[in-house]
Amino acid sequence: MMSETAMTIYYWGCYAWIIAGFLCIAIPAGKEFYKIFRNKGSEERSK
Amino acid sequence: MLSGAMGYIILIVFAFVFIGISVLVSKKFPAEGVDDFVVAGRGIPFGIIAASVMISWVWTTTIMGAAEAGTWYGVSGGFNYMWGAALPFFFFIPLVLHLRKIMPKCTTFTEFIRERFGKTVSTIFFVFGFAVVLYVVTEQGVGIGIAFNTMLHIPYWVGAVVPIMIVAVYISKAGLRGSIFNDVIQFFIVCIIFIICIPIILKTIGMDNIYNGLMDVVNNKDNPNYNPQALSMTSISGLKYGLIAAIVAMGQVLLDQGYYSKAIATTSRKDLMKAYIIGTILGWAPIPVLSGNIFGTSLISLGIGEGHGVASLSEAAPYIMNMVFGTGAGSLLFILMVFMAGMTTGGNGLAGAQALFTVDFYKRVRPDATEKQQLSFGKKVTIVIGLIVAVAAVLLEGVSLLKIDIFSGILFAAPTASFFAGLLWKKTSPVVAVISMIAGLVGGLITYFVIKDPNDAQFFGNLVALALPYVVIVIGSLFSKYEFDFSKLKNYEPAQKVNIKEEA
């Protein structure tokens, strides 16, 4: 049976997990998103 | 408290935002051909694919079902839901990497099956693939319809039909690229809601209270949720639940063209592996674990159970959100999460169906069709599929989805063995593939109906449907003289123009 300390670590650990996951995806995704639209914008301006 | 008017406002705002994005995407990135439309020109980088895979694998049940698992199995509920539903991706990732390697110009999994096993088996897989889409998208419509009806008091059919049609319109307009770009925006919103809400819920209820409440669930036989294993991570019933989740999800992943389309849309095999592993393990996996822990165990720790505060344990997530954030903000945040989870999963399914019909179906019916005609058909058929799903969701009002889930597990598990064998073993013939599928289906259904205990029937029915086809394939292929030449696939040229980068 899990102790209260173990449960606290488990619950907050999962919270740290989602933050880590979010950052690992959000940072590259945000950069790529920006790059795609910026490149498209400069392509359109050069036409 | 939110009123019905707020529900209609949410629907109208989302319709404008998401259809607006798809209009913008289709103007900025007009489809240059079929390949550009159904697999976004095979040029989407890692981060965007990871966000899209993560959010499209967050179903309405990833939040509500995992929360319910937390009420049934305690601290192991969300975790067991997570490993069960994530496991199929660890079969899918090497499978699709191998597929890209041996058949570089493949777009749909039915194309591969046609080249590997012939038209008859490909038609069977097409039917399975379409059935998966109908099942997955309908279930999202039903989930959103129930959420809008119970929390915002707007008619069930409006809550089910409008979101499905919003998705159908934006996929029809902008293809896979539109689906992926909308996914990224929704990924940010759903993650931010989770990241903000979780510490507030934990602080409001208190870790001490959750633990003490769970101790009561473990020790007090009068507790409505009495479960001696609620504080154990090795609960046997919880592990069994995880295994069923894995079998049910196996077919849903391996037969959902949406996941293949995204895998093929990724710039390289290296990016594909990274996106799917990070999207699943780091991005998606904590969502069901947290839903089980924060919503599920919190609910039972408060002494609330079925008939004791809630009508059904599936109300765990909305109940906790309403309790902590009030019926106004709590309902709004919960509705947003469920709405976006359903929209992205539905979008993934519809984009997959669009690819199946545009690339595979239309070329069979009209082999001489130009790419322009294919595109036009793909756009129209997406709306038609959306309408079919909307009608199905309306007809399913009040029907328990539990039985459909069980049968979907049996139905969709049966063809997965022949898919694997087709990719990896030259000796598996089309006849053996068909026999294995029939054996899995019939064996799974017989097992389900013969066993009297409903939990055992569900477990063993699904297990037989998944495992028996492997036995048939191993025996059938060992005694077969059939040999397939995989090098044929390397030179496969589809009807539509496909540009691929050479990969090592």
Image (spheres, coloured by chain):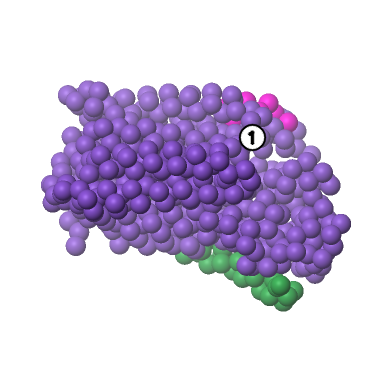
Chain colours: A green, B purple
Residue B186, horizontal then vertical, whole percent: 52, 47
The boundaries of the magenta stretch are: B153-162
Quadrant (top left/top right/bottom left/bottom right) for the C terminus of chain B: bottom left
Instruction: Please report the residue visible at 29 percent of the width from the left and 29 percent of the height from the top.
Output: B361
Residue B60, horizontal then vertical, whole percent: 58, 44
Depth check: give the residue in front, B53 or B429.
Answer: B429
Task: Kindly identify which residue carries mark 1.
Answer: B400
Q: Secondary structure at mark 1?
A: loop
Which residue is farthest right? B222
Q: Quadrant of residue B226?
A: bottom right
Q: Amino acid at mark 1?
A: Ser
| Lateral position of residue B346 relative to residue B175, left or right | right
Residue B451, horizontal then vertical, whole percent: 58, 44
Establish if B129 lies above or below B418.
Answer: above
Instruction: Please report the residue visible at 75 percent of the width from the left and 33 percent of the height from the top.
Output: B3
Q: Main secondary structure of the magenta part?
A: helix
Residue B249, horizontal then vertical, whole percent: 48, 49
Specify whether residue B264 is in view. Answer: no
Depth check: give the residue in front, A31 or B349.
Answer: B349
Quadrant (top left/top right/bottom left/bottom right) for the N terminus of chain B: top right
- Badge 1: chain ID: B
Q: Quadrant of residue B360?
A: top left
Establish if B6 lies above or below B322.
Answer: above
Specify whether residue B477 is in view. Answer: yes
